[in-house]
Image (cartoon, rainbow, N blue to C red):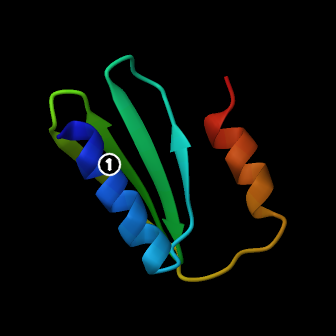
């Protein structure tokens, strides 16, 4: 049943022409990564059939220039 949920979801994404990638970060799950304008979705399908969804939405007022890269490195480097 858990695998069928994942397969049905992937089929629906394909039918709607929504691009996705698959990842495997935890032993008990498969993650589907979906990027749509202004949002990134992480959907994890677990072996026990439960699903976790996390949505990251842009808080930006719009596109930024190259100067934004400095902020990336300043705020997120070790």
Packing grade of label 1 (10 A; few <14, some 14-19, many >=20) is: many
Q: Which residue is mark 1?
A: 6
Q: Residue 45: x percent and y percent?
A: 29, 40
**Residue 56 visible in this rendered orientation of the protein:** no
Observer-nearest of 26 and 12: 12
Observer-nearest of 65 and 21: 21
Image quarter where the N terminus lies is top left
Going by the image, does 37 lie left or right of 64? left
Q: How many dots with numbers?
A: 1
Observer-nearest of 60 and 56: 56
Q: Is residue 9 above or below residue 49?
A: below
Q: Is residue 1 above or below residue 14?
A: above
- Residue shown at 63%/37% (left/top)? 76
Q: Residue 64: x percent and y percent?
A: 71, 75
For label 1, the SS is: helix
- Residue shown at 15%/39% (left/top)? 50
Q: Residue 77: x percent and y percent?
A: 69, 30
**Residue 43 visible in this rendered orientation of the protein:** yes
């Amino acid at each position: 049943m858990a695998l069928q949920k994942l397969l049905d979801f992937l089929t629906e994404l394909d039918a709607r022409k929504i691009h996705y990638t698959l990842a495997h970060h935890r032993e008990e799950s498969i993650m589907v990564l979906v990027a749509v304008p202004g949002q990134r979705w992480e959907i994890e399908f677990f072996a026990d059939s439960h699903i976790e969804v996390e949505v990251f939405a842009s808080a930006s007022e719009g596109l930024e220039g190259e100067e934004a890269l400095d902020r990336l490195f300043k705020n997120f480097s070790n």
